[in-house]
Image: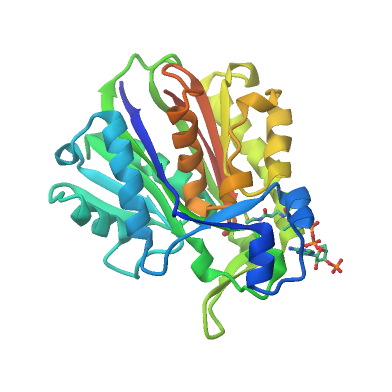
């Protein structure tokens, strides 16, 4: 049975770091570091330079993932970029990264599932690798999310940041058991009835994010809990098998609630939201990159990923590293 084995991870964060206090001051917001940190866990975010686009961030994350995997760009025959902030409607950001990497074989395309984008892209890449449509994939989440914020709306603009994360996957033969290395399952959901809770409003001079924060919060924990239970059940595993939770980094309270639900101690839950804020589709691969780079996630570890975002979209993925 073919498995999509994660051979490398990479992340990139723009150099400019903006603290909560600096953000409040810069945009003349009626907010405080204490309010933001207590409600969300966020203390700072990275902001891309004006000339940096999603493909620039994604390229740097992809290069790091390829280097960690020891794979040369000519082996890659599939690139999927999850982004809500593409360089342009087309060419796809994935095709731009393909070109920047000097790759001319295979195929590349973007996926739009807001903050769940990386989990969707991972699921699609896994399916394509398992059917033999491709052999080696780069799956990237890349966002310049600060470009679509309303800086006068303190309820949303304090929450997001820019960044990119990437993984390299290669099709390898497995035994078909939960002990195999690789993606063991992805479970994807969407429900457009909740589209208005978190959407990009294109009616003004600039496209900006609008959110009913409390409502999103209410959906987040129940939908994520159902998705992770589904992922574990289908794989024949239980909460006790999970070694690492790598959740979407929207909010410390949602992340902690999921950790409690799984019975995981805090040190087994990868948390970056304090330093990265919510980087939408980049948040899960950025967290993965951090936890593999610093040696927390090791070969053979079972990692559970989950995310929820605009759509609503949500999902979970299980992988053994
Ligand atoms: N600073 C100070 N006060 C603020 C701020 C701020 N940055 N933002 C909102 N407030 C005020 C509101 O104006 C409101 O004031 P009022 O009572 O005088 O009207 C008060 O705080 C309460 O507002 P709520 O929106 O009800 O605040 P809540 O406690 O729900 O916290 C938050 C808001 C942090 C967004 C919370 O709803 C949340 O965590 N939601 C989860 C959704 C999320 O994380 N979304 C991220 C994107 S989606 C995703 O990635 C899953």
Q: Residue at x 73, y 43 (%)?
A: 253
Q: Residue at x 68, y 72 (%)?
A: 153
Identify the colour scheme used: rainbow
Look at the image and tell me whether residue 19 can be seen.
yes
Q: How many badges with numbers are in the image?
A: 0
Q: Quadrant of ligand 1?
A: bottom right
Look at the image and tell me whether residue 130 can be seen.
no
Image x and y of residue 245, in percent: 58, 30
Q: Residue at x 46, y 30 (%)?
A: 185
Image x and y of residue 297, in percent: 48, 23
Q: Quadrant of residue 309?
A: bottom right
Outermost bottom residue: 205
Image x and y of residue 111, in percent: 39, 55
Q: Quadrant of residue 99?
A: bottom left
Q: Quadrant of the C terminus?
A: top left
Identify which residue, 188 or 147, lies in the foreground: 147
- Please indicate whether residue 95 sits to the left or right of residue 159 in the image: left
Is residue 52 positioned above or below 72 on the image? Answer: below
Is residue 245 positioned above or below 215 on the image? Answer: above
- Please indicate whether residue 197 sits to the left or right of residue 232 in the image: right
Q: Quadrant of the N terminus?
A: top left
Image x and y of residue 33, in percent: 74, 56
Is residue 149 positioned above or below 7 on the image? Answer: below
Q: Residue at x 71, y 50 (%)?
A: 40
Q: Quadrant of residue 265?
A: top right
């Amino acid at each position: 049975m073919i498995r999509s084995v994660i051979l490398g991870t990479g992340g990139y964060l723009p150099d400019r770091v903006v603290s909560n206090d600096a953000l409040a001051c810069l945009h003349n917001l009626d907010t405080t570091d204490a309010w933001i940190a207590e409600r969300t866990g966020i203390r700072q975010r990275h902001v891309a330079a004006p000339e940096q686009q999603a493909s620039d961030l994604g390229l740097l994350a992809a290069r790091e993932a390829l280097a960690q995997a020891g794979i040369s760009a000519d082996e890659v025959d599939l690139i999927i970029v999850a982004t809500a902030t593409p360089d342009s409607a087309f060419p796809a950001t994935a095709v731009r990264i393909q070109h920047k990497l000097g790759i001319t074989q295979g195929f590349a395309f973007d996926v739009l599932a807001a903050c769940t984008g990386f989990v969707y892209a991972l699921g699609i890449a896994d399916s394509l690798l398992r059917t033999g449509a491709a052999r080696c994939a780069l799956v990237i989440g890349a966002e310049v999310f600060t470009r679509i914020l309303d800086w006068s709306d303190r309820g949303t603009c304090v929450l997001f940041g820019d960044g990119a994360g990437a993984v390299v996957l290669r099709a390898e033969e497995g035994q078909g058991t939960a002990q195999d290395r690789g993606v063991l399952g992805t479970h994807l959901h969407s429900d457009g009835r909740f589209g208005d809770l978190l959407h990009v409003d294109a009616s003004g001079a600039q496209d900006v994010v609008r959110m009913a924060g409390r409502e999103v919060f209410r959906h987040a924990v129940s939908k994520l809990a159902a998705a992770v239970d589904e992922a574990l059940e289908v794989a024949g595993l239980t909460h006790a098998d999970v070694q690492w939770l790598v959740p979407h980094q929207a909010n410390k309270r949602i992340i902690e609630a999921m950790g409690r639900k799984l019975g995981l101690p805090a040190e087994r839950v990868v948390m970056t939201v304090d330093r990265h804020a919510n980087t939408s589709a980049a948040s899960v691969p950025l967290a993965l990159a951090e936890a593999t780079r610093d040696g927390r996630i090791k070969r053979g570890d079972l990692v559970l990923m989950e995310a929820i975002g605009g759509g609503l979209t949500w999902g979970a993925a299980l992988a053994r590293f």
